Amino acid sequence: MANQQDHIYETMGTIDSPNVVEAFVGQCLGTGPNEEIEFHPAQVRAVRLAETMVAMANSRGGSILVGVSGHPPKPTGILNPTEVIEAVLQASLMPIPPLIIPLPEIVETNGREILFVTIPAGLPHVYRFRGRYLTRRGRTNETISTMALRQLLLERTSSKIESQEVPGATLDDLDEDAVRAYADSLSGVTDDPLHLLRRRGCLTGEDHPTYAGILLFGRDPQQFLRTASILIARYPGREMGDQFLREEIVGTLPEQIRRAESFVLDNMRVGARLIGLEREEHTEYPQAVVRETIVNAVAHRDYSVRGEEARLLMFSDRIEVYSPGRLAGHVTLRNILEERFSRNEVIVQVLSDMGFIERLGYGIDRMVRLMEDDGLPPPKFHETANGFRVTLYGHGDRLLTPEQVTRSRWAHLMLNERQEKALEFLSDRGRITNRDFQSLCPEVSAETIRRDLVDLVERGLLLKIGEKRATYYIFK
């Protein structure tokens, strides 16, 4: 049951046949009572949706399927998708505080439609609806007990600077083109861009930008939050020294992510690894892991910590990424792979809309898996007195340059340098002639070239094809 929400996301991404939804819904119901899934018909009232949303938000999140009814449940069809989506969004604004949720997604099957509504896990508030604090028990919504409510409030106490109004900021401080591009990128959204920003928590009800709005869409975010930047440095060795390449990355959070990733990729070593006798091009670190690490540092840092920027330091053997603010909520170093808590739910949701974040999971477990797949140790997580650091260890000196690959792949054969050149040429071209070999070693006599080729044939490495001037050689 703990992995059910992961399964929902995987299924949503693979719905491409008429019967998948019916099978999926039946499978969900067949697992027994499940507090992470709720089914509603297309005509569900916004009040009912709001109640379930609050209950899920106060527990472990979940998914609501609208347009499903019956026993066993089947898609009933949504006659007016726009109207149902509006009801869902209206319901998300009813709780106190309002819920910031991903945009609902419509999936069509057999000419009928289902609306998927996701309530993320790890939300930072305790939510109430009509004076009641609700949670999920099995497949029902129940009032939270006093003791459980007190514990939940303790767990979810967190700085919420992102939702605060920025003193002195106005709509003119937002980049209109960036806001419009964001709105246009969201399929099925017909909202006025400013209305969309209000829904997302980037504007207050009086249309004053919040810190999230300025950080995501501001013309000059550092005017209002000076240390909302990333300091990047590249050192040639394993420790800090006097020689380094340094850059301070400013701008909006999406711009910072792109520029920081580009800096790392530009300064990352690219070489090769030997798989048997085959050369495999390889980067020093998996690019997807680098991206996830940067995105997490930007999305989950504590922007209320002043006087300290995020930092990314590249060394010859590792990358260290530091973000101000310790782990938030109930997340600890022990449970970081299993638990989720979003300090900046607005920032996380908008970056998710933009494609930077897989909203469910935040990428930590994916980082571990990708490092393992690449033959590297898992990321190291460390809390400092006032921050959080992730360390990635790369291939470092184990990553071979092309010259090193050439020397290494034939070293066990005890060949001379000329013969190694010939085999490298052959591995790239598929065949080699006497003339090709002569051009590789112009200072060597034709007789020496002939003897080198004869030796490679006698060793069983090469096969001679043809006679006289039509002769060429291939791997045996």
Image (tube, helix red, strand yellow):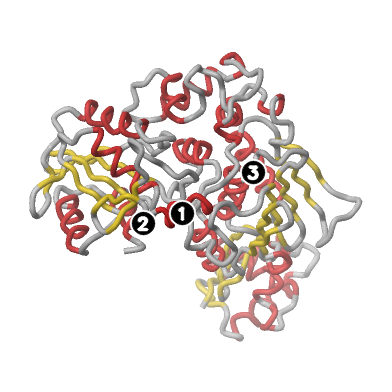
Q: Residue at x 24, y 26 (%)?
A: 82
Q: The residue under label 3 is which amino acid type?
A: Asp
Point out which mark residue 59 bears. none
- CA gap, disc 3 to disc 2? 27 Å
Q: Which residue is mark 1?
A: 361
Label 2: state its secondary structure: helix
> Marks 1 and 2, how far apart in space?
9 Å
Name the foreground residue: 194 vs 351.
194
Q: Which mark is residue 6?
A: 2
Q: Is residue 445 left or right of residue 333?
A: right
Q: Residues within 10 Å of mark 2 (few under 14, many from 20)?
A: few
Where residue 126 sits: x, y (%)? Answer: 45, 45
Query: Which element is circle 1 on?
Result: loop
Q: Residue 108 at what x, y percent from top left? A: 19, 40
User: Relative to residue 239, is residue 456 depicted above or below?
Assistant: below
Q: Are marks 1 and 2 in contact (CB under 8 Å)?
A: yes
* Snapshot quadrant of residue 286: bottom right
Residue at 29% across / 44% down in the picture? 52
Nearer to me, 370 or 144 = 144
**Which of marks 3 and 1 precedes in the sequence?**
3
Amino acid type of the residue that numbered disc 1 sits on in the rendered structure: Gly
| Residue at the image point whose x is 18% and y is 43% from the top | 40
Q: Quadrant of residue 87?
A: top left
State the separation of the CA atoms marked 1 and 3. 19 Å
